[in-house]
Amino acid sequence: MYKASLIISFYKKIEFLKPVIDSLMFQSEKNFEVIISDDGSPDEIVRQVKKILAKSDLNYQYVWHEDNGWRKNIILNKSVVQSKSDFLIFIDGDCILHKRFIEEHVRMANRGVVRAGRRVNLSERVSEKILAGAVSSHYYGIPILLELLPDSLRNKAKDVEQGIYIKSRWLRSFLNDKDKSIKGCNFSIFRQDLMEVNGYDERYNHPSLGEDTDLEARLRRNGVKFLGIRNQAIQYHLYHHQLSRHGNNIDIYNGNNRNGVTYTSFGINQ
């Protein structure tokens, strides 16, 4: 059994996914599987991604369904069902991983606890450099932080401090023993904890509010704790425009909270 199943949310943007896959091949922890959770990319994109994966030494699965609008939560639930590890790590297909990303999530794994990571939001300039293939695997560490510093000072890059890898046990404890909310692009959970709330609520059919926020609220009501893994499980988010929230998502989210829902009837088991 793998130590972790890394579930990568993906749709169409193969140019973003390529450097993400590259970063997987240099992970310090090797005993994991990769699940591409594809929300309906065209056949040609699917063929290209599978070709890239086949050339790597990664253990992977490709979970896909037809494009019928934004159905990210549905394909994520399907990926959870297909996973071959008891421990799940979720990222997005535009988030490049530090070489110790999976190692750190595995190291901090505990039943009844979600580990909530953060990300460095790259500038458009640095993102373009990465997408052009102008960097090596050694770039993701001190070199990228030094390059991002002037962009950060001009507010072109954000959360650059999240990219500082901290080894000190004392500092790690200080940073990560506090309650922390999750981002869907960087968190880990035991499969059983996720199944006890029936996974993602599949009624959400627009991006932003509702994917991770709703899941977190239901898990908390079910007694799961949320702790950080800052400056350990580091990732670098490629630049793109932010997505807007949708009123339908807000209504579903408020309804689940108002009714104290933990186990959604619209999840993995229906």
Image: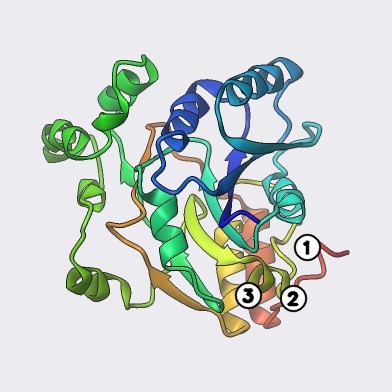
What is the number of the mark on residue 121?
none
Q: Are the residues at dot 2 and dot 3 in contact (C-beta closer than 8 Å)? A: yes
Q: Earlier in the sequence, mark 3 or mark 1?
A: 3
Q: Is residue 3 visible?
A: yes
Residue 263 placement (x, y as % from top left): 74, 75
Residue 248 in which image quadrant: bottom right
Distance from Cα at disc 1 to Cα at disc 2: 8 Å
Chosen colour scheme:
rainbow
Viewed as shown, does residue 257 lie left or right of 161? right
Up the image or down, 262 lies above or below 115; here it is below
For badge 1, the amino acid type reads Gly
Viewed as shown, does residue 154 lie left or right of 137? left
Q: Are the residues at dot 1 and dot 2 in contact (C-beta closer than 8 Å)? A: yes
Residue 98 in which image quadrant: top left
Quarter placement of the N terminus: bottom right
**Which residue does the numbered mark 1 point to in the structure image?**
267
Q: Toward the viewer: 3 or 184?
A: 3
Q: Earlier in the sequence, mark 2 or mark 3?
A: 3
Q: Residues within 10 Å of mark 3 (few under 14, many from 20)?
A: many
**Which residue does the numbered mark 2 point to in the structure image?**
263
Residue 155 placement (x, y as % from top left): 19, 39
